[in-house]
Image: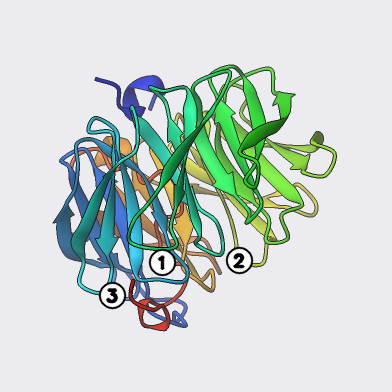
Amino acid sequence: MFVLRTLFVAAVIGWTVHTPISAQSRAYVTTLDDVVYVIDTVNLNVQGTITVGADPSGVAISSTVQEAYVADQSDGTITVINTATNSVDQQIVIGLQPVSITVTPDSTKAIVGLFGDTALGLMNMTGRTRTVSNVALANKPIGVVASNTTAYATDLGNSVCAIDLSSNTVTDTLALGTVGTGLALSQDGLALYVALLSNNQVVKIDTATFMITNTFTTGVGPFGVHLSPDDQRLYVSNQLANTVSVIDTTTGGVLATIPVGVRPTGLATTPAGERLFVANQGSNSVTAIDTTDFSTLATIPVGNTPISFGDFVEPVVNRSRRARP
């Protein structure tokens, strides 16, 4: 059985609220108990749990409808969660060993890294009947991210590739020299950031030329990457240092190094960026961080081996999204 943790070294303790949060959203945290923990990002507690498929890892959340999507590695399915009721709406067969998932900003497509199929699964999200097509890759995919027109995937072949979503074809491949893991894409789609696990670096790629334009130093074992809503900060989970690096995307300087739990993996901010949430695989917890002063607000216990590879915090307040027809 493949699970993401095997590929890579991979009660609330208390908090002081430093910065008021502008709007309530929820974090959806996958655990290898086959359960998603729903965390209130304002009160910093677990609202409830949702049973999903086997060995869930990747998470994505729609910005237009009230849905979250969970990649169930061992079942080969995507679990669709109705975030209005926090209940399972559908389970969709997608392919072998889905490890990562992202949705396009307009929420019309989901892109799934199918490790077992050495492919990306592209799922139409415009209705309740979800059609799926596959794009074959040269190497097994790890992380995925997308604009409305292009998807990007890292892979075990030490490269990152670009996939045109209108033709479903690989259009560019860039050699990284080592394994890339998590990715983040700027709001305008012009800058792609990729974590290099063994090099203790993140590279910045110009998506127009598909060339590396900058390299940032991180902690040991960078895995997940997440951009602040204004693209000014890059947050990086360092699995072997048990820290998060905060990088200024303009200067490349490290603004802070924040201690978190053991083997941090997924990380995501609230819609306005006031808080950062980090899933700690090795300590079965989620760390909540105030991004104004980089202090820890809470350490929230969850189930076994939280991964949450992807953008697992609601991008907008749930009530501002519509229900699925």
For label 2, count other residues whose C-alpha is less than 10 Å away and answer few (under 14), some (14-19) or many (20+).
some
Which residue: 31% across, 52% down?
286
Q: CA distance from mark 3 to mark 1?
A: 15 Å
Of the two numbered discs 2 and 1 on the same chain, state the one appearing first in sequence. 2
**Upstream in the sequence, badge 3 or badge 1?**
3
In-image side of 96 versus 230 (left or right)? left
**Which of the two residues, 80 or 40, is positioned nearer the viewer here?**
80
Q: Position of residue 206 (x, y in %)?
A: 80, 43
Front of the two marks 2 and 3:
2
Residue that carries the numbered disc 2 in the rendered image? 229
Q: Are marks 2 and 1 in contact (CB under 8 Å)?
A: no
* Residues at circles 3 and 1 in contact by the CB criterion of under 8 Å: no
Residue 81 coordinates in the image, percent (x, y): 26, 60
SS at mark 2 in the image: loop
Q: Position of residue 103 (x, y in %)?
A: 49, 54
Circle 1: residue type: Glu
Mark 3 = which residue? 43
- Residue 287 at x, y = what percent? 36, 54
User: Can residue 324 be spotted in the picture?
Assistant: yes
Q: Amino acid at mark 2?
A: Pro
Identity of the residue drawn at 60% across and 48% down: 184
Residue assigned mark 1:
314
Judge whether residue 246 can be spotted in this image: no
Q: Residue at the location (24% across, 20% down)?
A: 1
Neighbor class of circle 1 (other Cα within 10 Å; few <14, some 14-19, many 20+) is many
